[in-house]
Image: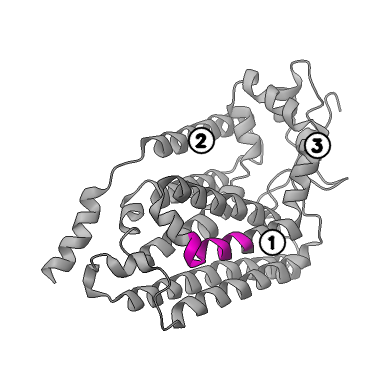
Amino acid sequence: MVSDCWSAAQALVDWVLDHWISFALILAFGVYLRGFLRLRRRKNRSATSLRALAFGGGVATLGVALASPIHELGERLLQVHMLQHVLLMMVAPPLLWLGWPLAPILLGLPRSLAHPIARIFAVSWVKWTARTLCHPVSAWLAFAAVMWGWHIPASYELALRSGAWHHVEHASFLAAALLFWRNVVEPWPSASAWPRWSMIPYLALADVQNTALCALLTFSDRVWYKTYALLPRPFGLSPLEDQATAGTIMWILGSAVLLAAVGCIVRELLVPGQGQVWPREPLPEVNAHLGGTPGPDPGWVRGILARPNSPGIPRVGS
């Protein structure tokens, strides 16, 4: 028992704060908060405390997953590593989108930076690429492919051996999950290419593939990832016990989040007026911020994220 505790404690001792990730997260929240406060000062109804708390919770979740001792302990315990993956794919992305981050971030950036971003996203092939990636079919397939692809033993072992590939793994988890959850949350000014009810099978099928992967991992009679079999075992867990616990964690938490989202959408469809917890309205502040200097029509935000004729940003002077 003493050796087990020592192994776990050693993971905490070996942990080194990732300054780059920490700086990026703090900077992102700072930019968001600056833009959010600008909206609040102008009494914009979209700038609610719930949104700021949601975005802050998403950033904090990323901090726990990527810049806390969980990251180091996950190198020794598969179950902790799977918890990290759940945070990256099931918890942080929906929270970030619930913060409706686009408007506050654009307003939080200096106009000298926000306007060049508008120029980039006004390019036709960039808009086409973004719309293709954001389409529900593309987003769902990316979510499933990333989840299954990185849990194949060869891919997983590669990420364990290489710090660079480990970063690629985590980045792909987050990117695919952001695409996936964007269609569920529909943050301003986006609107899914599919009707709202279609998000029920969208989420249910995501839960099916998550359940299948987790069941294979939980009930397997062999160790999938040999690296964990060779490491000192904290808390006296055998490699198979650790693996079964890892699969169970990802199974229960992943299904809980996905099915909770299904419940929210069902309630939204059945109870009139409950769909929009926060008001959906155009934000002329963003339009003015981007339209104050020569360049493309700031309707690029609507064009890249929303289906035609969906609520978005009004044109300058409208």
Secondary structure of the residue carrying tag 2 is helix
Question: Overall secondary structure of the magenta stretch?
Answer: helix
User: Which residue is under mark 2?
Assistant: 28
Count of numbered badges drawn on the protein: 3
First in sequence, mark 1 or 3: give its number. Answer: 3
Provide the secondary structure element on which disc 3 rests.
helix
Segment tinted magenta in the rendering: 145-155
Q: Is residue 194 above or below residue 58?
A: below
Q: Quadrant of the C terminus?
A: top right
Q: Is residue 254 visible?
A: yes
| Dot 3 and dot 2 residues touching (CB under 8 Å) | no
The kind of residue on which mark 3 rests is Trp
Please say if 101 is above or below 152.
Answer: above
Where does the image place residue 253, in percent across and percent down from the top left?
Answer: 48, 69
Q: Which mark is residue 141?
A: 1
Residue depicted at 73% across the width and 50% down the height = 134
Mark 3 = which residue?
125
> Gap between marks 2 and 1, in whole Å?
28 Å
- Amino acid at dot 2: Ala
Q: Nearer the viewer, mark 3 or mark 2?
A: 3
Tell me which label, 2 or 1, sits earlier in the chain. 2
Check disc 1 and report its element: helix, strand or loop: helix
